[in-house]
Structure formats: structure tokens, C-alpha cells
Amino acid sequence: MRLAETEGGFATVLAKGERDAGTILLVTLCHGKGGVLYERMPQLDGSRKFLAAKRENPEKPEEFSEYLERRRAQDRDMWLIEVDIADPERFVAQLDELR
């Protein structure tokens, strides 16, 4: 959240999960539009990178919200964080570098 603010964006926690073991899902927006859901996924080298799991369809934005609700219902331990930032892809790449 601090990184988003440092980059001139805004971040908020939409759903709090398990403090020590909850999965982190990240929704990125650019000026409130173009939602992309990123999830940290294990890689062959043992690292975990954020990968785009779902993209908002601008013609049917309600589907994206419904998908997020279903994911939350499936896993009450997950964290759902929303970031509105000018360059979402660069922001996610920076997160991967921090790990």
C-alpha cells in the first residue's frame, strides 16, 4: 500500500484475510478502470510471482465484481487489495522484485 502511495496511486484493503497464511490477491486499476486481478503463483524455480488471473471486460464490468465475490466466498482467509495506479503492470513488476 505504501508503494502505491509512493508511486502517486491509491491502495485499499477490500477484504482482510488470515494474518500469517492468507493468499494475497491484487486488483489493479488505472484511473478507476481496466481492472486486472493478480494472484501470486508458484514458479518452477520456487519463487512466487504475481500473474494476471482475470481481466475486467469493459462491456460487462459486473462479471469482474461477481468473480471477486465468488473467490472471496471460496477462501475467507485471502486478502484482497485494490490499487489504482497510473502504470499497473510496472507496479506489479516492482512487487515481484521486492520479494
Image (tube, rainbow, N blue to C red):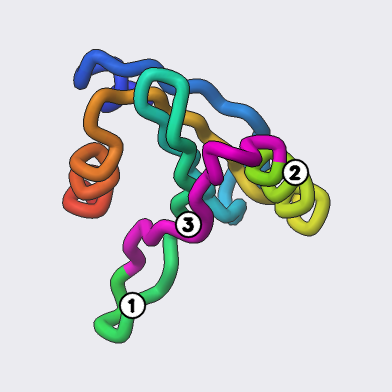
Which disc is residue 43 wearing?
Answer: 1
Asked whether disc 2 touches disc 1, contact meaning CB atoms under 8 Å apart, the reply is no
Which disc is residue 12 wearing?
Answer: none
Q: Earlier in the sequence, mark 2 or mark 1?
A: 1
Identity of the residue drawn at 60% across and 42% down? 79
**59 within the magenta span:** yes
Q: Residues within 10 Å of mark 2 (few under 14, many from 20)?
A: few
How far across and how far down the image is residue 48, in percent? 35, 66
Which disc is residue 66 wearing?
Answer: 2
Asked whether disc 3 touches disc 2, contact meaning CB atoms under 8 Å apart, the reply is no
Q: Residues within 10 Å of mark 3 (few under 14, many from 20)?
A: some
77 to 84, vertically: above or below: below
Q: Which residues are magenta?
A: 48-62
Q: Quadrant of residue 50?
A: bottom left
Q: Quadrant of residue 17?
A: top right
Whole-angstrom CA distance, mark 3 to mark 2, is 17 Å
**67 within the magenta span:** no
